[in-house]
Amino acid sequence: MYAQSLNAKDLTPVAAEDATKLAVFQARIDAEEKIEPNDWMPEQYRRTLIRQISQHAHSEVIGMQPEGNWVTRAPTLKRKAQLIAKIQDEAGHGLYLYSAAETLGVSREELYEQLLSGRAKYSSIFNYATLNYADMGAVGWLVDGAAIMNQIPLCRCSYGPYARAMILICKEESFHQRQGYDIMLAMCRGTPEQRAMAQDALNRFWWPSLMMFGPHDSNSTHSELSLRWKIKRFSNDGLRQKFLDATVPQAHYLGLSIPDPDLRLNGATGHWEHGPIDWDEFARVLAGDGPCNRQRMKHRRQSEADGSWVREAAADYAAKHRRAAERAA
Ligand code: FAQ
């Protein structure tokens, strides 16, 4: 996904790295030591982290849009305050993550440019529309639920700044997931119309949430190296399975049905099994042809343009103070 440019041809392949340095690096990873910004690291480790962390940051920033759509229409003051707090958290996560990426030697301007030019992508899930208020419940419950499942292991990522950033982020994601489930619970205990809205939101967000974990392991290009370097701790399918096992009973508790006729509990393994995922849909969304890709990018570019005067004013103000300090020196 993300910064295809980061897969550029000038990348030093792992095989071309200094063998001794590589062995020491791997031994540190195996010993669960954290890699810090000034430590030696293989070029591909750096690039993989920049790609993943920046994608994650872009996802948080773009991920504010589907929810921003409902701030003015949240049903009560309490729900509105929760939604605003959640969206603010997501802005904060984006800033944290951009800072973590910057420690790897990439500038924030470059990362923004990659997003705005469409070279860097963001999570597929944020290209789906939020059509009714129950979607705020489904996003919190399922999307933040999937995000936490993926992100708790990232607190143990081998790269120190990313791992440390994830600790606060996961605490906040946990609140997000709970407020989403609380919305679903309230709607499922409400009128038949509210229950129908909750079921409709689950129907639309179920499959895209499963897709969030990425392609099947057999098609995951980056997993092997990311697992070896302990950037990822679990494979895409491994995390998807954990999500499924945690979420299906939650749906049943709500009295909702999962929109998957093939869903079954495997008595022998004790795990839930899902039907086939529509990978063509996933590919279309990644290629920029999902329901809201164009709208999301248009909005982001407009926000960037609208904010340019603030950045210019801040830069002028900083320059003015720098000149004053120089004159006084
Ligand atoms: N969407 O080889 P893999 C959130 C791409 S934050 C789009 O398996 P990897 C909070 C992948 O880049 C959500 N593209 O890749 C929130 C690669 O393409 P490339 C974001 C995807 O990196 C909640 C190709 O497919 N979370 O939700 C997706 O090892 C509510 C092959 O894939 C993170 O970013 C996808 N879903 O594993 C905010 C967590 N999946 O680059 C607001 C950190 C895969 O070769 C509201 N990221 N691709 O062209 C990760 O853990 C990993 O990057 C994965 C993908 C697991 C997402």
Image: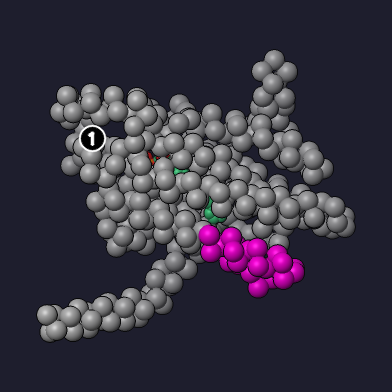
| Residue 133 in view of the camera | yes
Which residue shows up at 41% across the image and 37% down it?
Answer: 157
Left or right: where does residue 41 sit relative to residue 93?
Answer: left
Residue identified by numbered label 1: 42
Q: Is residue 286 above or below residue 292?
A: above
- Quadrant for residue 323, please give it: bottom left
- Quadrant for residue 34, please give it: top left
Left or right: where does residue 159 sit relative to residue 89?
Answer: left
What colour scheme governs how the chains and residues are painted in the rendered image of this protein? Answer: one colour
Q: Is mark 1 on a helix, strand or loop?
A: loop
Q: Is residue 167 above or below residue 320?
A: above
The image position of residue 125, as x and y in percent, is 54, 50
- Majority secondary structure in the magenta region: helix
**Type of residue at label 1?**
Pro
Check the image and name the residue furthest to the front: 329
Q: What span is in magenta?
A: 65-89
Q: In which quarter of the image is ligand 1?
A: top left
- Mark 1, other Cα within 10 Å: few <14 / some 14–19 / many ≥20: some
In the image, is residue 122 part of the stretch drawn in magenta?
no
The image position of residue 275, as x and y in percent, is 65, 31
Which residue shows up at 42% across the image and 45% down it?
Answer: 164
Left or right: where does residue 65 sit relative to residue 133?
Answer: left
Q: In this view, does 126 lie above or below 35?
A: below
Front one among 41 and 270:
41
Locate the C terminus and report the quarter of the image it occupies: bottom left
The image position of residue 225, as x and y in percent, is 34, 29
Locate the N terminus and report the quarter of the image it occupies: top left
